[in-house]
Amino acid sequence: MTWAGLPSTGKAYLWGGGGGGGGKDAATPGGAGSGGGFAEVDFVLSEGDVLQVVVGGPGGSGQSGVAGQGGGSPGASYLTTATIFNTRTTAASPAVFDQYNPNYCAFLNTYGVWESNTNLRDFDRFYTVFFPTTGLYTFTASADNSAVISMDGIPLFSATTFTQTFEQPVQVTAGNHTVRIQALNTGGPGSVALTISGGSNFSAGRGGNAGGAGSSGGGGGGGGATVLLLNGNVIGVAGGGGGGGGAGNGPQGQQAPGPNGQAPALTNNGQNGTNKNGDGGGGGGGGGGLTGGNGGQSPGGDTGGQAGFYGGSFSVNGAAAGATGRLPAGATYPYWSSLRGYGGNGGAFSPFTPSDGTPGYAVIEIDTVGGFVKDAGVWKPIEAAYIKVNNTWQRIQATYRKTTGGFFFAPQSIWQPISDSYSPLFSQSSTQVGINPREATGDAGQGGGGGGCCVVSTAFADQGIWSPQQKHELIAWCEDQLHNRVLGECFRRGYQVVGSKALPILKTLWGRTYARWAFDNGTRMVRGKSFSWWSVPNSVLWISAFMLVGAMVTTRYANRCWKSTGKD
């Protein structure tokens, strides 16, 4: 919403999404998810201010009586992970020129630039970069031979070789900042590359899968945070609830919040619950928040998983609290709806089936004086104004009066808004809403939720062939389209085995070139994006190999293959 009117005060009431309940094991119930957090925020709006609200999504319930799958889905929330700057496409003054060298890493060949005289020793450029929101951004660089990256006059980090990339997470406030690249070439052609990506991520973590050796419950997914921003700055957060632990044949899954607390400051996204090896319930996912909730672990034995923890709540100048039971925090405040922010049932009571959490909620009050009308001898404020158009009364956003203005020798009539009347301009966008959880700690089972077993995209990102954003996008698609589906799990097992065996091809330049072409086109084809038709036979061969191998191997063997690569 963009404010178009005189300054006004407002208040927001925010509730985060509830965590999902854990799945059951036969008659043993899973743990209940915790309710969403609460934040009450006071703010002031002036002409041109932009107020944004993203309502946290609910955590999904864990599936019951499943093997090797069933973790509940994470709740979506405010997410900005796009690449906002790169040296190859951003104009510079003086101009820069693209560089390529077969000895460079793929990242430097993709984004590298230098002076027109490639043998010059020094490179120095200033860029004005607009950061759309306050949040955590990742600066990635590589250089031939070295470079120092600074922002607003403060050095951030150095890149000291052309064969690998260097990354630095930086907390940045919304608005324009000056980024400086100073590079040094000690001989031969020079090149330097920098990308900036990231922003904010308040989404929740996925529930951990049930153990593959039995028939247990998956952990519930965490709830997404509800976030309020004023001109790109976060002024209020209602954290999402933690997901309940999945049940094993022993003690039931743990009720959220679990024992693992929240992440350090500046980490807003929830963590995935741990997948269970052997037999037993998966861990619950953590909720998104100002500090994201950590996921639950999966203890040894055929027993229930730990619950996830709720995300932290925050208000720049008001109340904030997290929920410790299924009922959301702030349920006694005005406007709360009984259908919002509840933690899911783990099947411990009627209707005895695990349920999803319920979505978050936001109510915004804006104080205006506006016009008055005399009713029964009493002046009362006009709360809403209407106009009749084609015999239909339609509400208008502001009321105006005609006044005389201008110079005394040239008077003119001017329409002006009635004092403190307002005219907010509303718009909707889904481009900054999504899911990108933190990966689980401990045993990762099938690598669910965070895509830990995406060995090729992880290797690509490590070597600078792909950006972190490309990896995260593929992981998110994999979670949505392949996880917990029979054919999808078969494909993933085969991919884990074949992909891990094929990684040595990346040791040669020819192998990296072929792998990128094949993987780019293959993943684009299965996701319904544009791809080269010349790649279809190659992609069909790889997909057929994945399905054939996946049908013949066990989940445990596939896990050992991708873990042996050392990739997360």
Image (cartoon, rainbow, N blue to C red):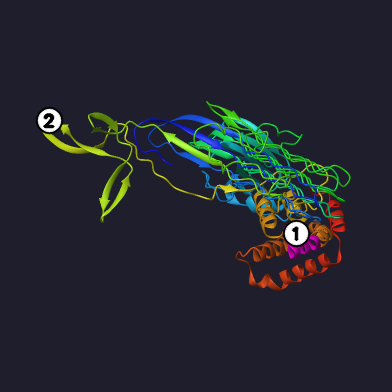
Residue 125 in view of the camera: no
Image location of residue 475, percent across then percent down: 69, 53
Seen in the picture, residue 446 relative to 147 is either above or below; the reply is below
Tell me which segment is drawn in magenta: 483-495
Q: Quadrant of residue 68?
A: bottom right
- Say if the magenta span includes residue 494: yes
Q: Is residue 539 visible?
A: yes
Q: Position of residue 496 (x, y in %)?
A: 80, 58
Counting the numbered discs, the total is: 2
The answer to whether 414 appears left or right of 536 in the picture is left
The quadrant the N terminus occupies is top left
Q: Residue 158's image quarter?
A: top right
Q: CA distance from mark 2 to mark 1?
A: 77 Å
**Mark 1, residues whose alpha carbon is within 10 Å: few (<14), some, or many (≥20)?**
many
Determine which residue is flagged by label 2: 408
Question: Which of marks 1 and 2 precedes in the sequence?
Answer: 2
Read off the residue under disc 1: 512
Q: Residue at x 46, y 37 (%)?
A: 364
Q: Amino acid at mark 2?
A: Phe
**Foreground residue, 238 or 339?**
339
Which one is nearer the viewer's eye here, 332 or 95? 332
Is residue 140 rendered magenta in the image?
no
- From the viewer's side, name the closer residue of 54 and 362: 362
For this orientation, the residue located farthest to the top is 317
In percent of the image, x 85 and y 48: which residue is there?
Answer: 249
| Amino acid on which the number 1 mark rests in the picture | Arg
